[in-house]
């Protein structure tokens, strides 16, 4: 009898609930009538995501969550659900980098660019051959594999030392010509003076 009384206690009884026909939420039966009127007047179910949105905010909800996006690069109209994929992988005008030279260009031009860029060659410092860039990774894997099985990159390989040549002999500096030139002028001057003095004395002797 005590147990039966406990089960019928209003304080412990689970309140009855009803499902709102508009939003499909479970509402206490005591409030279902008031809720149904308020829900039908103020809330609207989004046809795209099923979310109940205030009627006055439905346009804003649609624009922010479901309206198609206009791509400013390729000028296409993209569903918002596909926008992230389009922007990162699908847009033909998105900027991508060449795997050989890392130059950025529109994705639509990438294949043509890499066909040319990949045919450029670089000099392998280990085998002394010119290798196409598109074949560089395979070349290193096949031809330059370390004993531990890992590929040795050209940047990690040691560049052979160049032949060391002795420095060219330094020629001794030529003596300055300034002092010799002065001595020569002095000798010529002294000789000229001596000749003049001698001729004067000779003329005086003849006059006597």
Image: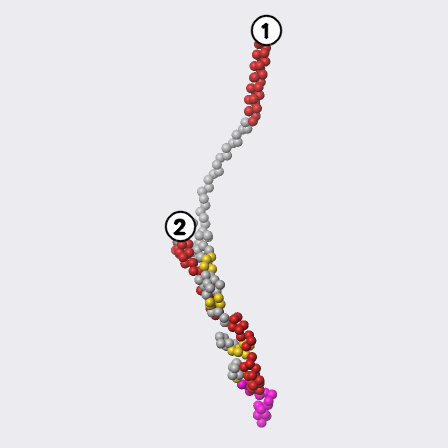
Q: Which residues are magenta?
A: 1-18
Q: Please state, as top left, top right, bottom left or bottom right, where the N terminus lies in the image.
A: bottom right
Tell me which label, 2 or 1, sits earlier in the chain.
2
Out of 62 and 98, give the one closest to the viewer. 62
Q: Is residue 132 left or right of residue 7?
A: left
Q: Residue 91: which quarter of the image?
A: bottom left
Horizontal and vertical percent for residue 2? 59, 92
Which residue carries the number 2 mark?
130
Q: Residue 115: which quarter of the image?
A: bottom left
Total count of labels: 2
Residue at position x 56%, y 86% from top? 33
Label 2's element?
strand
Which residue carries the number 1 mark?
207
Is residue 27 in sight in this rendering? no
Cα separation between marks 2 and 1: 100 Å
Out of 116 and 181, give the one closest to the viewer. 116
Q: Please state, as top left, top right, bottom left or bottom right, where the C terminus lies in the image.
A: top right
Residue at position x 53%, y 31% from top? 173
State which mark lies toward you, 2 or 1.
Answer: 1
Label 1's element?
helix
């Amino acid at each position: 009898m005590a147990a039966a009384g406990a089960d019928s206690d209003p304080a412990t009884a689970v309140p009855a609930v009803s499902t709102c026909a508009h939003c499909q939420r479970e509402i206490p039966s005591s409030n279902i009538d008031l809720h149904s009127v308020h829900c039908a007047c103020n809330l609207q179910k989004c046809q795209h995501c099923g979310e109940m949105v205030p009627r006055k905010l439905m346009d804003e909800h649609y624009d922010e969550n479901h309206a198609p996006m206009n791509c400013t690069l390729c000028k296409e109209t993209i569903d918002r659900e596909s926008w992230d994929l389009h922007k990162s992988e699908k847009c033909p005008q998105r900027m991508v980098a060449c795997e050989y030279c890392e130059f950025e260009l529109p994705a639509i031009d990438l294949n043509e660019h890499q066909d040319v860029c990949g045919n450029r060659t670089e000099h392998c410092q280990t085998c002394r051959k010119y290798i196409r860039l598109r074949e560089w990774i395979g070349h290193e894997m096949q031809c330059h594999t370390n004993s531990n099985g890992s590929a040795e990159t050209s940047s990690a390989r040691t560049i052979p030392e160049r032949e060391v040549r002795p420095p060219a002999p330094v020629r001794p500096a030529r003596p300055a010509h300034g002092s010799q030139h002065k001595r020569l002028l002095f000798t010529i001057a002294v000789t000229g003076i001596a000749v003049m003095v001698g001729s004067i004395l000779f003329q005086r002797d003849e006059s006597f």
